[in-house]
Amino acid sequence: MPDRDAPRRTTPADPAASADAAGTPNAPKRTRATRAKAATGAEGAEPTAAPARRTRTTKAKPAETAEAAETTGTTPAPAKRTRTTKAKAAETAEAAASTPAAPAKRTRATKAKPVEAAETPAAPAKRTRTATAKTAEAAETPAAPRRTRATAKTTKAAAPAAEPAAAPRPLPASEHELGAAATGSYHDPHSVLGAHPYDGAVTVRTLKPLAQAVAVVLPDGTTVEMEHEYNGIWRAVVAREDLPRYTLRVQWTDGAAPVDVEDPYRFLPTLGELDLYLLQEGRHEELWKALGAHVREVDGVAGTSFSVWAPNARAVQVVGDFDAWDGRTCSLRSLGGSGIWELFLPGVGDGAVYKYRILGADGVWRDKADPLARRTEVPPATGSIVTASSYEWDDDAWLAERAQTQAIASPMSIYEVHLASWRPGLGYRELADELVAYVREMGFTHVEFMPVAEHPFGGSWGYQVTGYYAPTSRLGSPDDLRHLIDTLHRAGIGVIMDWVPAHFPKDEFALARFDGTPLYEHADPRKGEHPDWGTYIFDLGRREVKNFLVANACYWLEEFHVDGLRVDAVASMLYLDYSREDGQWVPNEYGGRENLESIQFLQEVNATAYKRAPGITMIAEESTSFPGVTRPTDQGGLGFGFKWNMGWMHDTLEYLSEEPIHRQYHHGELTFSMVYQYSENFVLPISHDEVVHGKGSLLRKTPGDDWQQAATTRAYLAFQWAHPGKQLIFMGTEFAQGTEWSEETGLPWWLLEYPLHRGVQQLVRDLNGLQHRYPALSELDQDPAGFEWLVGDDAGHDTIAFARRARNGDPVVVVVNFSSVPWEGYRVPLPEGGGWSEVLNSDAPVYGGSGVGNLGRVDAEQVPMHGREHSVRLSVPPLGAVILVPERLTAR
C-alpha cells in the first residue's frame, strides 16, 4: 500500500517551488472547480509543514505564507486539492528546521528532479505511474505535504543535497530476441536493431560483431558511445525524444581510424501498401520494379533495396562482398502476411554480387539466387548482380510504326538464331554490327532469339532457365542486349524471343524448393515434375507464381522492347497427362485431362501483354489440335497471335524424305495443311528442333546426291514462302548447312565458298524480296479469299499449283515440282489472261540449278481448265518451283 503521508504523482509535472512551513494546524480544502493558493511559509515556525495533498486531475500551486503560524506557533495543515484545480508551489520557504522532513514517496511512472538542500536531508519522492515530479524542499515541519495522483508539479522543499536525475532506461529486449538478431535468424530485426524511442529517450542498437568500439553520431556531430550488450550487439541510449537521422562510428581494430557508416536498420520499408496489396493479389504487372535489387536513394542516402518473396522462410539474409558473405548483419524484415522480406542497404551499388541466404521451415540455411535478379554472374558462377540501366533507346519510330501494324496481314519471315553460336565469340555489342547487317541483307523481317534468359547449362540452349529476369551474361550486360535490339529496330528488323514458362530446372541455387518448401513448383510430383525433361513444373494455381510469369513476359516486352514472345512447350502445359501413363497424372475438377490453371494463365499473359505493349505478337509452340489457340480470349480462346504449324512441318518433311518416285503415294502430306489452314493463325517453322538429335539438317533430310538435295531444298523453301502463313527457318538453313547444328561449334560459314550453298542463300534472299514486293504472299494468309488450288491432285507428277491473292485481288501463281523429272508443256490454269512474268525459278543457274524454265515470261492462252478461262503451258524444272505474276504488276 502506498504511504498516504508521502506525495503521490500520476501525471507529468513542471518544477514546483517549495512551500514554507506555516503555523496553522489545518490547511484549507480545495474543490475540483476552484484554484487555491497555498499560504506562504511563516518565519520562525518550529515544526515542519505536512505536504499538500493533490487529487488526480488538479495541479497544485504552492500555498502562500500563513500568518497564523506566527500567532499560534503551530504549523498550518496542508491545503487539500481536488481533481480539477491547479496549484503552483511557492518558490522558496525559509522555515527554520528543527525537525527533519518526512521523505516524499514516488510512484512508478513519475520522474523526480533533485531537491534542494535544507538543514536536514530530504527523503526521495515516490513516483506514481503517470506523473513526473521534482522533490520538495524540506521544511522544519514534522510532516510532508500529501499529493494526489493527478498533480503534475511538486513543491520545493529545502534539502541538504540534490538528488541526481534518473537515467532513461533502454528499450527492453529479451535474450531470445537479442540472440536471434545476433545470429541473423530473427524475422523482424528492425524491432531490435536501429533507433527506437523509449522512456523519453532513444535506444539505438546495432550488430557489429567484430567491432572494438561503436558510437552513435548525431546530426550535430556529437557522439554517444555505445556499450556492448550481447553477442556483437551494441547499445546506446540517446537523450533525445526522437532520432530520425544518425550514423555509426565504428572502430574495427585497435589503433585503426574509426569509420562512419549508415545503419540499414534506421530506414522505413521501400515497398508501399499498394505494392504489397498487388503482390498478395497476384496482380503486380510491374513486379520487377517491386522485388529484386534496386539502386536507389532513401533519405538522401544512396544504396540498394532488396526484397524477395519467401513466405515459408523463418529468416532471410542478403549476402555478398559488401558483408563478406556473412549475412548476420544484413537480415531482412518480414513484411507481415505478404511473404515479402525487405531491407535497404546503404552504400551497396551497381555491380555488387549477392545472394539470399534463406532459413527454411526445416531449419536449413540455403543460398539462393534472386528470382528477380536482372543480371547474373557468368556461368558456372551463380551469383546475382545489382544492376541499374543507363541505356537510352533510339527506336521510338519503330515502336510507333509497330503499334499501327497488323502482323497477321504483313510480311513476316523469321530468322531463328542461337546468339552464342551464330558466330562464336561475338557478344551482344559485336552482334549488333555483324548479325544486324546480315539479317538486313538477307531481307528477313524478324529475328527470333532462342532463350536469352540466364541458364546454367549451355547445352540446354537456354530452355532450362534459372534467371527469368536476367539476360545471359555470357554475351554481355543487359544494356548490351538493349543495344543489340535497338540496332535491329533501327534497321527495320523486329525481335522475337523464346520464352519458357512451362518448366524450370532443379538446380539448388535457383527456384527449386526456394524457401525450403515447394514454392514455385507443385508439391505433388504428378503435377509438379516433368518426366521428359527432369524439371519442375510451375504451380500456376498460385497467384504469386502466376504473377511472377505474367510480369516476366511484360518485363521483356517493356524493358527490352522485344516485339514478341514465342512461348515454348505450350502443349505440355495444356494437358495434365502430357507424357504420362495412367496413374501418373491427376484429372482436373471436372475429371478431364485439360490443365485449367495453365489455360487460365496463358489467357492472362496474352491479354496482359497485348494490353501493355501495342503491336507485339505472342506465338505458341503448340503441336496438338487444341482448339482456339489463336482465338481472342474474350471469345474463349488462349489469345495467341500465332501458332507454330507443327503439322505442316512434320507432314511436309515426311514427304520430302521419300524417294521422288514414291512421293506420289504421299501426296496428301503435301496438301493436307490447307484443310485446317484457317482454323488458326499459323507460322510455318523449320526450327532448331528439326536439325539436331540425329534428325539431320534440312539439306540431308532429302534423298539423292548433293545436287538433288540442294534442288529439293530450294523447291521446298519456295513452297514454304508461297504457302499461306508466316515463315521461320533456323540459322544455317538459309545456306543449306549440311551437318547438324551444334551449339559448341557454330555455323559452317565456309560452305558459302561453294555455288550450291551460295545459291540457296541467294534464293532465300530473293524470296524475302518477293514477299515484300507482292502483298498477295502475305496479306490474306488467314483468309480463304487469299488462296485457291489450281492443281492440287496431280500426285502422278508430284506437282502442285496454286494462286495467292492480295486484298485488292492481284494474283501470284506458284507451281512446284517435287519430281526429279522436268515437265515440258505442263498446263496450268491461270486466274487471268495476258502476259505473265516468271519472277522466280528455283532451278535458275544463279541458284545452282540446271536452268530449266520459261525464259522469264509466258503468255496466257484462252484455253479453259479446271473452271478457269485461261491456262498456260510451262516448262517446270525438276525438283524446282516457278512463281509467276501478271506483267501488269511487274511494270509498276
Image (tube, rainbow, N blue to C red):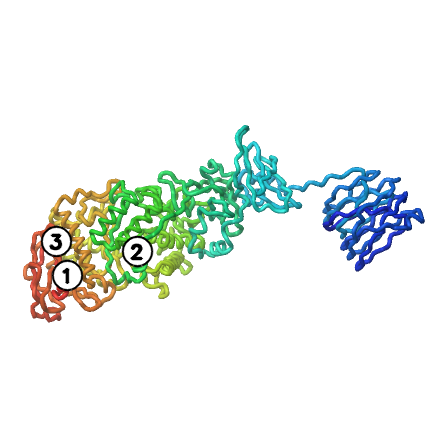
Q: Which of 355 and 593 is in front in this view?
A: 355
Residue at image mark 1 = 814
| Figure label count | 3
Of residues 42 and 255, which is closer to you in this image? 42
Where residue 487 appears, x then y in whole percent?
29, 50
- Could you tell me if residue 599 is visible in this image? no
Q: In this view, does 847 lie to the left or right of 423?
A: left
Please give the name of the residue rendered at 9% of the width and 52% of the height, measured from the top-left corner: 845
Q: SS class of the residue under badge 2?
A: loop
What whole-number distance in Å separates the C-alpha atoms at marks 2 and 1?
28 Å
* Helix, strand or loop under label 1: strand
Disc 1 marks a residue whose amino acid type is Val
| Image location (x, y in percent) of residue 717 | 18, 54
Q: How crowded is mark 1: few (under 14 residues within 10 Å), some or many (20 or more)?
A: many
Q: What is the x, y in percent for residue 450? A: 29, 49
Q: Residue furthest right?
A: 72
In primary-sequence order, the first of circles 2 and 1 is 2
Is residue 682 at all visible to an observer of this figure?
A: yes
Mark sitting earlier along the chain (2/3): 2
Q: Marks 2 and 3, Cα distance to the nearest angstrom?
A: 30 Å
Mark 2 or 1, which is nearer the eye? 1
Residue at x 29% of width, y 53% of height:
495
Q: Tag on residue 622?
A: 2
Query: Which residue matches tag 3?
Result: 660
Report which quarter residue 247 is drawn in: top right
Q: Judge the density around disc 2: few (<14), some (14-19), many (≥20) Cα neighbours within 10 Å.
A: many
